Amino acid sequence: MSAAPSLANLPVTALKGVGDSFAQTLAKLNLFTVQDVLFHLPLRYLDRTTVVPIGDLAPNTSVVLEGTVVRCDVVMGRRRSLVVTLRDETGQVNLRFYHFTGAQKAQFAVGAEVRCFGDPRLGASGIELYHPEYELIQPGAAYKPVDQSLTPVYPTTEGLSQARLRKLTSQAVALMRTSPPAELLPAEINRRFGVETLAHALAYVHFPPKEAPIPALVAGTHPCQQRLAFEEMLAHHLALQESREQARQETAPRLPVDSKLLQDFYDSLPFSPTNAQQRVIRDIHADLSQPQPMLRLVQGDVGSGKTLVAAAAALAAVGNGWQVALAAPTEILAEQHKRNFERWLAPLGFQVAWLVGKLTAKQKEKTLEQIAHGEAHLVVGTHALFQEQVRFAKLGLVIIDEQHRFGVHQRLSLRDKNAASGAAPIFPHQLVMTATPIPRTLAMTAYADLDLSVIDELPPGRTPVNTVLISQQRRADVIERVRDACLAGRQVYWVCTLVEDSETLAAAAAEEMASRLRQSLPELQIGLIHGRLNSRDKEQTMAQFKDGHIQLLVATTVIEVGVDVPNASLMIIENPERLGLAQLHQLRGRVGRGNIESHCVLLYGHPLSKVAKERLQVMRRTHDGFVIAEEDLRIRGPGELLGTRQTGALQFRLADLERDAHMIPLVHETAELLHTYNQALIRPLIQRWFAHQQHYVKG
């Protein structure tokens, strides 16, 4: 193995054109050395090698197109915009600019020839390109050829253009030829991927040669990309393992559970906890009785009773005189938790407070005092819990509900809010909960810093939801079914899925659907919830639905998590093929929460692909979230379970667990080899990939 490479110590100011001021801009991306620039990898590639006829445009595919300006107008709407209409012999398309100057408008004179590059999306006038890159083709000028190879696109920040990043990377690659990065992995790894050296893989990925296989690079499956992704996944796994070891060196309060208090809690419940709940509670109580911080992830399917498990964990803390913080992703869910915890803990003598954005200044001030003086034993809140002014007297346990909705740095920031630390820091225990079932192999990689408990049993009395697939061509029949259900005293969800990954367009689709349903069902009370409403309006509508004043709730997927309306027995999901199975399963879990027979209608659009049909059939066959997760992993990979680039504690640059799941066994095997035979290489590997993200790793 070679010695540490000098480029790791060479500052970015060694690159031409980088002075102290520009170095500060690069620092926002954690680019401090030339090696950092080399490992700042492309997010994707642009294919500017072919001009696409306007008539062939399709959404969500980056394209180069050329056309003649036939119209240019400033349009006044919700936002003022410049709309330029381009035409070629196959059709026409609009370019839309929300930020523009008078000089820019003048460039787009009628008759001007334009070449532009961008991502077509569905907009107000059909397919549009928003803020495309463009250049004017001067009359009589020689024909400018399109690019001959793929163009890398990097993560960037304000004040740093793609063109400038590419120039910096080009310099870094040139320097690498004389000072290559160290080969920190066994030579067998390069051979396995068919790559000569790490330096070769880096150069290839930054600047693919003219003859490079475009489909493989776009898909991220080229051997050079796979070699780098493997090393990144390995570094990520090692970093999480190191984080776990660091946590074991820290001190946490011992919180042995009071058996009488726990029995009083159980006796107050109108039901008995399931065997699975009791097993997970025992896992947690065993952790809490130790002087090292608990770091445990509890996975439980929709309706499996994670809240009860969290309450039993909280009892151990408050019973020993320590406080508990519970963070929920939405105010609706936080309020639901508050009601449950008040119902369970107040009779046992514990005070539950809550901290959310909608509190008045006076209410917030009073709550902050109660937290700081230890009068609030358990504090339920949203992102407001992470604010600077929140300070706990004795914080013993942090519970995070639906952890993927929070930034990891937020979860870790709660550790620093403990006034009880004194000279020797005392860290609270951490319990992380998720209703997204994750296959065990994947969880071991994504959450290698957490112990894992699974609630794999549903409480008795949960009614299975009958799931059916119905074509949108039978929409009228479905509307009649909704009418019958509501007139029979039941309540119904009608879910509009995200349109083109735009909350604005999804909100518009939901508004349009609510309007159509009001016309078709004038006798019903119909409510509407979407992400563009403010929190107060959303909560007010949700409360009216929960109280039965609204019979039919039209919503986007914002109702996915945690809301409990036992009288809701029918859910219609529009275009279910747009969603991942995990998300569909979460949505379906909003019905079947009472003892009424419940139904979920997957109202699919045409044409339905073979893969989409196979996925939706899984929803019909099973209600087991773990089976659904395994099937999704088999059919599509884990991208939608974990997010393709963010997983565990760190932000991936190149690795994608959806695409690269096949490498997980080799990652575990290589990590074990390094721990056994060459521990000296572990820290340099972590430093190379995550040197500037260490605040994510420690916890």
Image: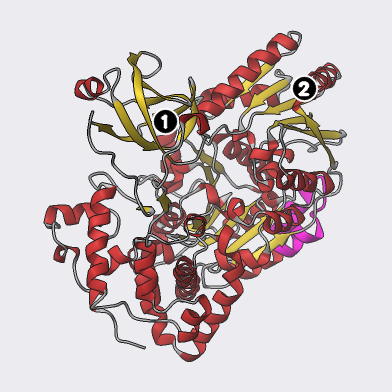
Above or below 47: residue 638 = below
Res. 417 image quadrant:
bottom left
Image mark for residue 129: 1
Residue most toward the bottom? 677
Query: Which amino acid lies under the numbered mark 2 shown in the image of this protein?
Result: Arg
Image mark for residue 11: none
Q: Left or right: where does residue 570 sit relative to residue 153?
A: right
- Judged by depth in the image, the label closer to the viewer, 2 or 1, is 1
Examine the residues drawn in magenta and state their main secondary structure: helix
- Can the viewer see residue 328 in this picture? yes
Q: Residue at x 72, y 38 (%)?
A: 608
* Magenta stretch: includes residue 262: yes
Pick the residue in front: 173 or 435: 173
Pick the residue in front: 330 or 104: 104
Q: Residue at x 35, y 72 (%)?
A: 688
Q: Which residue is mark 2?
A: 475
Separation (CA) of disc 2 from disc 1 = 32 Å
Residue 544 horizontal/vertical position (percent): 66, 21
Residue 546 horizontal/vertical position (percent): 70, 27
- Tag 2's secondary structure? helix
Which span is picked out in magenta? 261-280
Res. 564 image quadrant:
top right
Above or below 350: residue 653 = below
* Magenta stretch: includes residue 94: no
Pick the residue in front: 428 or 400: 400
Above or below 82: residue 467 = below
Residue 309 horizontal/vertical position (percent): 68, 55
